[in-house]
Amino acid sequence: MADLTPKENYLRMLSGEIPEYVPAFYIPYMDMVEEELLTPVSAPEGTYITSLGVEYIGCPDLNMGAMPNPNKKLCPDILNWDKYIKAPDLSDRNWEMYFKAQEERWDRNNRLLYIGGGDYFLSAVSFMGYEDTMMAMYEEPDALLELLDYVSDFYIEVMKKEIYYTKPDAFNLMDDDSAYRSPFFSVEMYRKFFKPFQQRHCDLALENGMVIERHDCGRCEQFIDDWLEMGIKGWGPAQTSNDLKKIKEKYVGRLAIQGGWDNQGILGSPLVPVQDLKDALVEYVDMLAPGGGFVYMAMIGGDPADPAVAERNGIIKDFYDDYVHDYYKTHK
């Protein structure tokens, strides 16, 4: 039996200490505060209109994950963005009742409670598409910064209410600014357009005693030093297009790797030979677990009812139980 709760163990890992056992999604350690005013994660009913007016549609290939409708551009002209993008009036919203209705889902004793947000690049893309966002960064930077500043005031207002009414333990800074093999823009462009607004969220989180994690897909390792400067302690999914071995060695004790499994190739497929999967699991854990700062996130994608998917995910779970869970007790 573990002496630490999943929450205590996870916080120990994020602090840079060696946890009692390796965290994994098999032992739930977090609960999420839902907030309908912010960017949706999924659109299970097929269509969802955000509080800022963006239409999202559920993508069946992504388990109904929400994607901006590519056929409906909310802001066709960055120079007149204020004609198209209006934050809602929140003066009459019953914040207390909204969050209180979620409390029965939270286990504050055993799991961290976290809030998310700060998705400024993806917000801009949702307003006007990827191409127009990139063009605005070069051709109309002042207008884009004005838009982001307006959106940031709205996002920060929502975050302050979340903090006041829920007293969360953690903040997850959620934005995807990189493709699998390369970032969408330079570090300098990140620092000019997006970091200042994300810094507002991180500062607010730190002022309220929260730990900060970063969700960023793709090859985003060039931004790590900026994340650390903002107070970020953990990063997922940490895809393997980044040099994870080098990152682990350089940032051990300062940045936890939450993931790091190669789910884009054969190792994320039910076609992977069983022995290859077992060998890869040993290599994966032995590279990322030493020194702490690691969350086990290996898995096989596909239909859970598929016997090949079920068999391989069973192997992954058994490997966690037999080899990974007590790694810090069995490995020096």
Image (cartoon, helix red, strand yellow):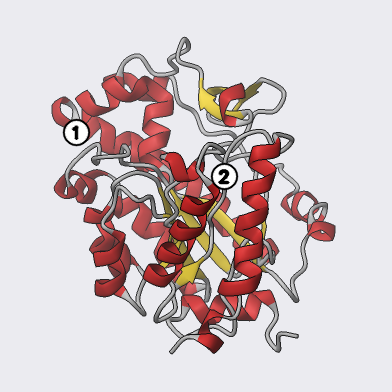
Q: Nearer the viewer, residue 213 or 261?
A: 261
Q: Which residue: 31% across, 60% down?
A: 244
113 vs 238, left or right, is: right
Can residue 233 be seen in the rendering of this structure? no
- Give residue 290's quadrant in the image: bottom left
Q: Which residue: 45% across, 18% down?
A: 74
Q: Mark 1 points at which residue?
A: 141
Q: Tag 1, which secondary structure?
A: helix
Q: Position of residue 6 (x, y in %)?
A: 67, 75
- Give residue 39's quadrant in the image: top right
Can residue 31 be seen in the rendering of this structure? yes
What amino acid does circle 2 point to?
A: Ile
Q: Which residue: 43% across, 89% down?
A: 332
Q: Is residue 226 above or below residue 182?
A: below
Quarter of the rendering occupied by the N terminus: bottom right
Q: Name the residue under label 2.
A: 300
Q: Residues within 10 Å of mark 2 (few under 14, many from 20)?
A: many
Q: Which residue: 20% across, 47% down?
A: 192
Q: Position of residue 194 (x, y in %)?
A: 30, 46
